[in-house]
């Protein structure tokens, strides 16, 4: 069996800490970096961002949509980027939010996590809203490949709250997704492994109690499920507040920042990442 995603993530936490840099080449950021709004500008942005993160953080999260908007040329850049990242010890989470059923989901697996996947990565974000059970075949295949699957559970966008807070038998949808992931990780994580390979996306700007997830702040039902938390930086959550936001769960959080460091520009990016790391260290120590 290959090394599991959970084991890779734990090693990354140990070596580099819990900061993740989102690679989000917004149109406005390309302009701020004095780069053309084209595949060529995208390629230069991605190259500079990758160079700034290698050896500085252990995890990056490319947002696929900002590559996809350039069509086949953008996907070619993403392929190149993924291949270069794979030569480093970075853990790469592709933020694509794929989700479907049957052969369609199998095809997504082959594109992102399969043995011959053109977009090389360690984990993929997915949506469970065609049914959590529909993800299980891909999860099983991912486990065999040493890959991770990170499932949307409680997202920062206000449009998602009504669905994610909805209850069935008195349990929120978000809590049901968390419980399903916890169960899978409990039976698939190796002995003594800190993390399983199936994570949850939980927005850093949320009140966890409102989504039925308040218990994980106290360490109840926390298990081995890693948490990918967008929302730090430009969206308003402070890295220095990590313990206040997530409590006992903070030790399992991948803290994702993007615009707040990328806005520093190509010359200031490395320093901005270093500052963010220090802020997070302080936040986890409180």
Image (spheres, rainbow, N blue to C red):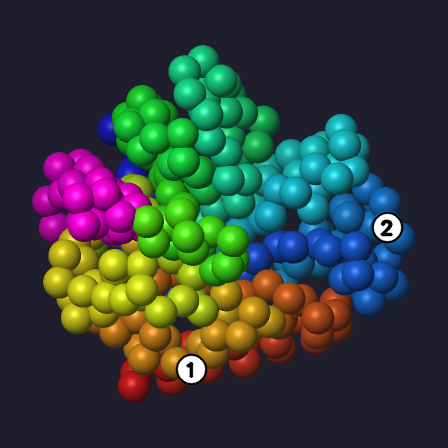
- In the image, what residue occupies the spot 65% across and 34% down? 79
Which residues lie in the magenta part? Answer: 167-193
Residue 105 falls left or right of residue 251: right
Q: Is residue 190 visible?
A: no
Secondary element at tag 2: loop
Say whether residue 147 is magenta: no
Residue for point 76% across, 29% down: 72
Residue situated in front as seen by the camera: 122 or 27: 27
Q: Is residue 96 left or right of residue 168?
A: right
Label 2, label 1: how many angstroms apart (C-alpha)? Answer: 34 Å
Quarter of the image containing the C terminus? bottom left
For the residue pair 238 and 60, the one nearer the viewer reads as: 238
Question: Counting residues from the N terminus, which is met first, the one under dot 2 or under dot 1?
Answer: 2
Horizontal side, residue 159 vs residue 177: left or right: right
Q: Is residue 51 visible?
A: yes
Residue at 31% across / 22% down in the picture?
Answer: 137
For mark 2, does the 10 Å Cα neighbourhood hold few (<14), some (14 to 19), or many (20 or more) residues?
some
Question: Which residue is label 1 attached to?
Answer: 240
Q: Is residue 190 magenta?
A: yes
Q: Could you tell me residue 269's position as x and y percent?
A: 66, 70
- Mark 1 crowd level (few <14, some 14–19, many ≥20, 10 Å Cα): many
Q: Which mark is residue 132?
A: none
Q: Residue at x 40, y 36 (%)?
A: 129
Asked which quadrant contains residue 151, the reply is: top left
Up the image or down, 183 lies above or below 111; here it is below
Which quadrant is home to the N terminus?
A: top left
Residue 277 image offset from top left, x and y in percent: 47, 75
Instruction: Indicate the quadrant where residue 128 lies.
Output: top left
Q: How many marks?
A: 2
Percent position (x, y) of residue 58? 45, 58
SS under mark 1: helix
Which residue is labeled 2 in the image? 37
């Amino acid at each position: 069996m290959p090394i599991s995603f959970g084991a890779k993530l734990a090693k990354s936490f140990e070596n580099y800490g819990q900061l993740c840099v989102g690679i989000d080449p917004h149109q406005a950021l390309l302009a701020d970096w004095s780069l053309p709004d084209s595949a060529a500008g995208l390629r230069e942005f991605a190259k500079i961002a990758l160079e700034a993160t290698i050896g500085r953080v252990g995890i990056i999260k490319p947002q696929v949509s900002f590559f996809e908007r350039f069509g086949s040329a953008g996907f070619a850049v993403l392929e190149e980027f993924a291949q270069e990242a794979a030569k480093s010890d970075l853990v790469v989470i592709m933020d694509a939010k794929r989700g479907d059923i049957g052969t369609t989901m199998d095809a997504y697996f082959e594109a992102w996590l399969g043995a011959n996947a053109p977009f090389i990565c360690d984990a993929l974000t997915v949506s469970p809203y065609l049914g959590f059970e529909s993800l299980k075949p891909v999860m099983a295949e991912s486990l065999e490949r040493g890959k991770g699957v990170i499932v949307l559970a409680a997202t920062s966008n206000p449009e998602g709250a009504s669905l994610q807070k909805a209850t069935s038998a008195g349990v929120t949808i978000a809590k049901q997704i968390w419980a399903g992931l916890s169960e899978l990780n409990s039976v698939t994580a190796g002995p003594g492994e800190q993390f399983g390979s199936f994570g949850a996306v939980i927005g850093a700007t949320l009140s966890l109690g409102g989504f039925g997830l308040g218990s994980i702040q106290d360490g109840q039902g926390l298990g081995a499920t890693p948490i990918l938390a967008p929302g730090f930086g430009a969206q308003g959550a402070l890295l220095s507040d990590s313990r206040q936001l997530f409590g006992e769960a903070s030790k399992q959080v991948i803290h994702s920042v993007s615009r707040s460091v990328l806005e520093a520009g190509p010359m200031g990016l490395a320093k901005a990442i270093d500052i963010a790391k220090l802020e997070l260290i302080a936040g986890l120590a409180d």
